[in-house]
Image (spheres, coloured by chain):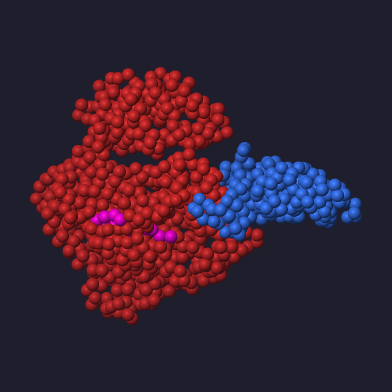
Amino acid sequence: MAMHRETDKIGAVLVVGAGVAGMQAALDLANSGYYVYLTDRSPTIGGIMAQLDKTFPTNDCSMCIISPKLVEVGRHLNIEVLPDTDVETLEGELGHFRATLNRRPRYIDPVKCTGCGDCRKVCPVMAVNEFNAGLDLREATYIRYPQAVPLAFAIDRQVCIGCGLCGQVCLAQAIKYHDVPVKREIEVGAVILTVGTEVFDPSGLENYHYAQQPNVVTSLEFERILSASGPYRGHLMRPYDREEPKKIAWLQCVGSRDVRTNSYCSAVCCMYAIKEAVIAKEHAHGDLDTAIFYMDMRTYGKDFEQYYNRAREEHGVRFIRSRVHSIDPDGECDLRISYVDDRGEKQSESFDLAVLSVGFQVSESVKHLARRLGIGLNQHNFAQTDPFMPVATSRPGVYVCGTFQCPKDIPQSVMEASAAAAACSAALSEARWTRTKSKAVPPERAVSAAEPRIGVFVCNCGINIGGIVDVPAVREYARTLPQVVHVEDNLYTCSQDTQVKISKIIQEHNLNRVVVAAWTPLTHEPMFQETLIDVGLNKYLFEMANIRNQDSWVHMKEPERATAKAKDLVRMAVARARLLKPLVEKPLDITQRALVIGGGMAGLIAALNLADQGFETIIIEKDKELGGNARHLGHTIEGRDVQKFLHRLIADVENHARIQILTQALVVGFSGYKGNFTTEVLVGPGMYERKIKHGATIVATGAQEYRPREFLYGEHDQVMTLLELGHKVSQRYEVAKWDRVVMIQCVGSRNAENPNCSRICCQGAVKYALQLKDINPDLDVVILYRDLRMYGFLEDYYLKARNQGVMFARYDLDNPPQVESVDGKLRVTFNDHILNCPVQMPVDAVVLSAATRAADTEELASLLKIPRSADGFFIEAHAKLRPVDFASEGIFLCGMAHSPKLISESIAQAMAAAARAGAFLADVSQTISGVTAHVDQSRCAACLVCVKTCPYGVPHINRDNVSEINVALCQGCGTCASECPAKVIQLAHYEDDQLSAKIRAAF
Amino acid sequence: MDNLFEPKILTFLCNWCSYAGADLAGVSRFQYPPNIRVIRTMCSGRVDPTQVIEGLRSGFDSVFVFGCHFGDCHYLEGNYHTARRMQLVRQLLELAGIGPDRLQLRWVSAAEGQLFADYVTELTELTRELGPLRASRWQLPLAAVQRACNSPRLRWLLGMDRQLTEKQNVYEQRLDADAFQDLLRQCAKLEYQQALLVEALQDGPKTVRQMAALTGLPVYCVSLRLNDLERTGQADLLEYEGTSPKFRLMAA
């Protein structure tokens, strides 16, 4: 390794804010070879997502999908989690920053705290529980939520009276009343701000009576009401009397799209309101009536429109387009909502629960932070960014992502987090692996031939186990089990000093199997396995008995039976431990080269970033020219010149030493697996064949504008699409002569044929309307829309267009506008929904906001074995947390091939894909898990059951006509083993005899 | 009518001052009404709030506690603790709607036989004016007050009162005495309301509205306190009656 010079960039990154975006950025960077300092103001990581019940559009449990990430971040060797920490100053520049961190006292040592909660039980003072959004109380000694990382309590000094009781009951001696703030200076090469936003507090809006009426709640409170870990244990109840509500109303745009509060759109509230309504209906015992009061239904994300349709059609959620005037008390605790409907008539309706769909805003503390760090803010106090550099702040080397960049949902935040990681990774690539830690692993002891020598460690967990289960009895019982040569019980088996002790005992007693009876393996197994590795014992020679979460904690009133169960669990664990085998984790060979399929904006950005990260990259483009759809765009809605940017980007890509471009290239073959792909391409007019070996693949095949069959398109030459209008606008002379133009939204979108929303056409129409008004202020522009989906800061342009006299008129799907050609002149007729009568007008041009449809990728999808949705867009591994990954590892997705999106969003997603691919390529020390399926090929009948069963399509029948499972691809679920008719597949570590031994040992 | 009512009054006397004072009243033949029934404790500090409530629940119309004057306590400062503790019990009685005056605390030295007789006369008259307690009517609130008096949280705060407000807490700070009294009152209120719900649920599961009707607490208050019980594993949802959830007590 080269010597570290003074001028070298620093291979470490500071990530400020540990919500889901911060965690993603930290993981991507740490996996890419950078050391990460991950700070959070609160005592734990996880952010707002940890508070949510379910997540749209998949209705996954939020905690279930975020907690593995929490554990991964908490255990990562190269992520230093710094809770309770503020960033005070930041000096220096890209590559060489010096940050001063201030850790506020927490009064409980997170290293010593085992999270047992004994301190909480005795604490005599109460505070409002912010995690449950103020619906209930908590003690002054608290943990934000049970799955928190670090899993350690803190003392809320604001309410603590210092009585000292927690200090007396804490057996781990973790309470530190004399904790003081600690300042620390760190050196980093770059900074990512993922500080997030706060939810709007509606107390100030007196017409909603939020502060006075218990049955008026915010959407965050409602998430907690629905959550199984919330104050009502997931039962749908209203706060006032805990009755199940029969009628619930949601009020959209509270603290959003309102010039009194925040004028921008918070971008997520429409979807979460629909989700909450659907989930509430699922929870209800009686008939639940749900109504959403809204201005525009903004379900613009991938597959969101279908979610909206299902809510309306299948679940019967009522959607009331309206302006709500007030919520007033009605009787004892009901609420009367007064509103004006879309015909301008006053209405009112009574409900027994009202949910205010509150938006996001930047908190005061974040504004201060931005000031301290010298970051420019926009007019709404969010970080100022450029559409072409969506994750760069005004200060070079300081990046931003998540809701502090602009209000957005979780997948968008996760995507941007990876994008910010990509930006850092490209900027600091020369310093990769210079600051990271690695672990020296001693050589492994051979144990396979040896007689099992089992050590059993039983945990008291303070009094959490020992207070119920008779731990000494369990320990003595374990001593009597065959091949158990050593037993111990510990106050806290998980504590650091016990690890040292266990290591010593393993060596002294020459143990070759270890059983720990304590907590759940979900959080603690990796830690104990590390202890084994440290003394040269294979980590698969370890087994746990969960005698806390699944015994002492759930049988608190039956100590004797709990003890008997603990003995059973220990006996079962020992029985399996006896049969455990050491497994080898083979290194994964990785070809450090990336292939990008698609040379549009997304593909170019991804390739350039990967190349800047130091990876050789090949771009395959089917056209002659690079640039894709972006070639047809003049300016962004913000007024940035797309062509100028694109030309520079193409030049950068073409001139990059590490990038190879193959135009007029067609993928005809694809084989291999993560790290080792081979792609066959036919290149150029000569169609010569090339084989490319690469370790990662990025799919960026884009999308295309729909060719309308509606509204005389193709029949009258003054009927055009948005892209076609774009050309005319940049030429100016023709449009300058127009007197009136009508734009029709949702052409080929949001209908039976294509139920999805194309996301970008509303802003496209408004953008061109503004540009037309700029050319000719007297021009009449009428936009006929269904819902105007100007999410986030796009709302600013909607406001601007209205102020400049652009007319907006709404139409319904069942009553679309009519476009006629009368003597060659165009005439448009539409229904005015306020006057409820038809309006007819002659126009010079009709502009159709044509849908964005998927490109033809059927063949590519079948070659790469990657899934597509019914409408032809590729399907990512997980809609929420893996927005740019495919389920097949080593293949990534970005741009409009994923779904329609803005240039800025495509750029962010392309960078995200580059980050994910880069992190994968960078880590050459990756190994393949030992828990994989193996076929006894001598007995395989090639019946294809495994091939059909595997959810990942891994087994295949090889040339010898037997099933073969590539361990590098096997995910280790074991489904094939359970289905194999000949019983010739075994899943390592969960072999038949290991499971049977456990079953038989239960008696 | 009033003259017909002869209250029965439970009286605690500390060994060193007030009991001796009462004896002196006897030696001196100072007369007082025959309504009190005396229990001798070594110090007024031994009088546990729960015993005061037990007295009322058993049929006494009021409870008097006598101790030494401040500074005279045989055990140095037992009576300071008594004073704070009885103040809290009076607050609880007030919360329960019974009124604070059913509990009276007075200081009498061994030399104040006359004062003892005067106090007993005056306080007996006061009880007579309050009328009979009829504990059976106050069953639920009295049971709740007693439960609150036995709550470890409240007892701990009470026990730490002087340490925290006159000496120092673990952060080496002294808490403001008035603020601490507010906190105590707040805690007593929460504990009392929780205890009411626990008592209300003793004879079977109930809806929030049923609990409110039984306890007289506002509906929303029941909802909030019920939540405290659920959070600490003392109550949970049993079943639905239509769309009304019924809650039950968890076995202790």
Q: Nearer the viewer, residue A348 or A445?
A: A445
Please indicate, yes or no, whether residue A263 appears anywhere in the rendered image.
yes
Q: Residue at x 49, y 53 (%)?
A: B171
Q: Nearer the viewer, residue A867 or B11?
A: B11
Residue extending furthest toward the bottom: A778
Q: In terms of secondary structure, what is the magenta stretch mainly? A: strand
Residue A941: quarter of image? top left
Q: Relative to residue B144, is residue A93 drawn left or right?
A: left
Q: Relative to residue A8, is residue A234 drawn left or right?
A: right
Q: At which x and y percent is residue A622?
A: 18, 53
Q: Any idea which chain is the blue one in this picture?
A: B
Residue A673: quarter of image? top left
Image colour assigned to chain A: red
Tally of numbered tags: 0
In the displayed structure, A928 sits above or below B171; it is above
Please indicate, yes or no, whether residue B220 appears anywhere in the rendered image.
no
Q: At which x and y percent is residue A757?
A: 37, 58
In the displayed structure, A351 sits above or below A531; it is below
Q: Relative to residue A732, is residue A480 drawn left or right?
A: right
In the displayed structure, A331 sits above or below A553; it is below
Magenta residues, as a range? A185-198
Q: Is residue A188 found inside the magenta-colored segment of the image?
A: yes
Q: At which x and y percent is residue A624?
A: 15, 57
Q: Residue at x 26, y 59 (%)?
A: A97
Q: Nearer the viewer, residue A58 or A7?
A: A7
Q: Residue at x 74, y 48 (%)?
A: B17
Q: Is residue A136 found inside the magenta-colored segment of the image?
A: no
In the displayed structure, A900 sits above or below A826; it is above
Q: Nearer the viewer, residue A875 or A75?
A: A75
Q: Residue at x 82, y 53 (%)?
A: B114
Q: At which x and y percent is residue A725?
A: 27, 69
